């Protein structure tokens, strides 16, 4: 009897091992790809991203109705026409670069996550697919083209998008996806007050870029709170460009007259994480913050638990 039980145990262990060995591995997530936003005024938005920010305007291989404003070879802001009945929402999706779009699709499917039946392919050779996170936010995984080249953007305010932020209601629910399945790990958390957590930053497993949960609360479930303004939502749904010196970048923008007519905070400031930053807003309110790569003051609320993004 004991030998039979032993044999069953060995067989079960071998079966589990075999399943684990054949399960697809998670491909690398190598950094932020882009933030995709809506515009109600394409001309004003074009001026903002091209003339103020200095990004290179290039065609959108994914969507003929869209346009890209490139910061680097594989990072950009995608701008799409505002759909009907959008309300105050101006965010379409966040996107992350991966070494294999098909591998990531198969990995998530094997983990029981709802995925499309196949990946999409762009005219530039890129591949991608889109899923929903636990709160219904669209998340895209992009395999950039093998021959991706840096854009012609000599006046771009910065070449590296170091993080994106999204409105989040339930930190634990989101962690099941971003941390549990995708392997994101803690970088820093903080709030306006020491006793309350408002922001949770989690780095990607194979990059120092990060996603920032912009926590909110209320009876709205996973929807946009009914009392939230378009400006406040744009503060939460944002992107950040890394700087060696935010003060220098701000001076370049101001002295060059590039901030005229642009909504901005009017000055640089020290963030709660001890990093200098400067905030400006596109014509529909999406925030772009310039942020120092490294802290120059002690951060509030928690220490950094991972290395800063590379310059």
Image (tube, rainbow, N blue to C red):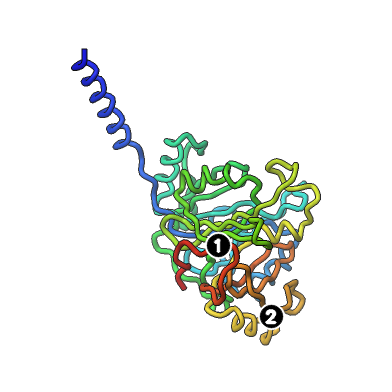
Foreground residue among 269 and 19:
269
- For residue 84, say whether it is visible: no
Foreground residue among 266 and 124:
266
Q: Position of residue 82 (x, y in %)?
A: 72, 54
Element at label 2:
loop
Foreground residue among 169 and 9:
9
Which residue is the extreme one toward the bottom? 255
Q: Is residue 30 above or below residue 83?
A: below
Marked residue nearer the N-terminal end (2 or 1):
2
Element at label 1:
loop
- For residue 83, say whether it is visible: yes
Q: Which mark is residue 87?
A: none
Q: Is residue 284 above or below residue 142?
A: below
User: Residue placed at 63% from the left, 45% from the top?
Assistant: 170
User: Residue placed at 54% from the left, 71% from the top?
Assistant: 242
CA gap, disc 2 and disc 1: 36 Å
User: Residue placed at 47% from the left, 68% from the top?
Assistant: 308
Residue under label 1, please give it: 302
User: Circle 2: is it few (<14), some (14-19), or many (20+) Cα within 10 Å?
Assistant: some
Question: With 188 as the anchor, is 271 left or right in this view?
Answer: right
Number of numbered markers: 2
Residue under label 2, please give it: 258
Which residue is the extreme one toward the left? 3
User: Residue placed at 76% from the left, 61% from the top?
Assistant: 231
Q: Position of residue 239 (x, y in %)?
A: 61, 63
């Amino acid at each position: 009897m004991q030998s039979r039980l032993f044999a069953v145990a060995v067989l079960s262990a071998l079966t589990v091992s075999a399943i684990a060995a054949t399960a697809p591995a998670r491909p690398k997530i190598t950094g932020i790809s882009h933030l995709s936003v809506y515009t109600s005024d394409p001309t004003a938005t074009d001026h903002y991203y091209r003339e103020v920010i200095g990004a290179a305007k290039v065609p959108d291989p994914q969507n003929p109705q869209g346009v890209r404003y490139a910061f680097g070879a594989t990072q950009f802001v995608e701008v799409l026409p505002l759909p009907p009945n959008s309300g105050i929402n101006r965010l379409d999706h966040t996107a992350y670069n991966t070494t294999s779009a098909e591998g990531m699709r198969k990995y998530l499917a094997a983990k029981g996550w709802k995925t499309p039946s196949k990946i999409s392919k762009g005219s530039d050779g890129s591949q991608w697919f889109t899923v929903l996170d636990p709160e219904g936010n669209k998340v895209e995984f992009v395999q950039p083209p093998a021959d991706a080249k840096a854009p012609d953007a000599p006046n771009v305010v910065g070449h590296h998008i170091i993080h994106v932020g999204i409105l989040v209601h339930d930190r634990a629910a989101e962690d099941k996806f971003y941390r549990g399945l995708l392997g994101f790990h803690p970088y820093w958390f903080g709030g306006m007050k020491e006793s309350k957590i408002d922001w949770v930053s989690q780095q990607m497993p194979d990059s120092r870029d990060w996603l920032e949960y912009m926590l909110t609360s209320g009876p709205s479930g996973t929807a946009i709170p009914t009392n939230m303004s378009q400006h406040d939502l744009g503060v939460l749904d944002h992107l950040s460009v890394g700087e060696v010196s935010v003060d220098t970048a701000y001076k370049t923008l101001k002295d060059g007259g590039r901030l005229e007519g642009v909504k901005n905070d009017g000055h640089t400031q020290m963030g709660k994480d001890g990093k200098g930053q400067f905030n400006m807003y596109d014509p529909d309110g999406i925030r772009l913050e310039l942020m120092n790569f490294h802290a120059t003051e002690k951060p509030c609320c928690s220490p950094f638990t991972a290395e800063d993004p590379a310059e």
